[in-house]
Every structure is written in C-alpha cells, then in structure tokens.
Image (tube, grey):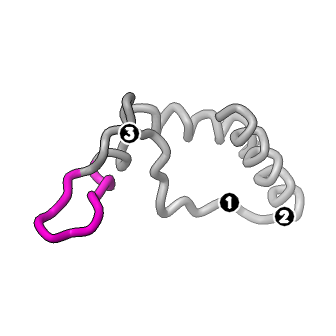
Amino acid sequence: YRKFAKTVFKMMNWWAKQGIDGFRMTLFLTSKPDGLPDGPQAPNAPYGDGGSLVANGKHEHEYLREIESASLK
C-alpha cells in the first residue's frame, strides 16, 4: 500500500502544480475486509458481488485524510 500511495500522492501533487482545482473521486473502494472474503453470489450469477464489502470500508476516511494531508495543501 505504501508504494502505491506514494505514487498516487506524487501524481496528485503534479496535477495540483499544473493548476487544477481539485480531484473528483466518485468511486472510492479501497478498504476490503480482513481475510479478503468473496462477495455474495446471486443465483445463476457467474461471480459474486463484492460491492457491499468494499464500499464505505473501515479505512476509507483514514485514506481520504491521508490524501488530503499529503496532496491537497
């Protein structure tokens, strides 16, 4: 995670220096539960739906605060 986060922060800072006003994060699914469980699978569906496992994850606000402190000043 650390290496990925540093790369994202570097990219965000680069864009900020170009003069953009902000970033739109319409889909922020970053915090899967420990153990990486599969999502529920509907009858006859080929795959499970993990949306309910990753949306509003327990670390989401922590990650957003980290983005703000590292990139959006």
Which amino acid type is marked by label 1? Gly
Could you tell me residue 13's position as x and y percent? Answer: 82, 50
| Residue plotted at (81% across, 56% down) | 16
Asked if the residue under mark 1 is in contact with the one under mark 3, i.e. CB atoms within 8 Å, the reply is no
Task: Judge whether residue 25 is colored magenta.
Answer: no
- In the picture, measured across the screen, residue 50 lies left or right of residue 61, that is left
Tell me which segment is drawn in magenta. Answer: 40-52
- Give the residue at mark 2: 19
Q: CA distance from mark 3 to mark 1?
A: 23 Å
Q: Residue furthest left?
A: 43
Could you tell me residue 31's position as x and y percent? Answer: 45, 39
User: In the figure, 68 relative to 23: above or below?
Assistant: above
| Residue plotted at (52% across, 31% down) | 62
- Give the residue at mark 3: 57
Residue closer to the observer: 3 or 35: 35
Question: Which label's residue is closer to the chain start, 3 or 1?
Answer: 1
Q: CA distance from mark 2 to mark 3?
A: 31 Å
Which amino acid type is marked by label 2? Gly
- Give the residue at mark 1: 22
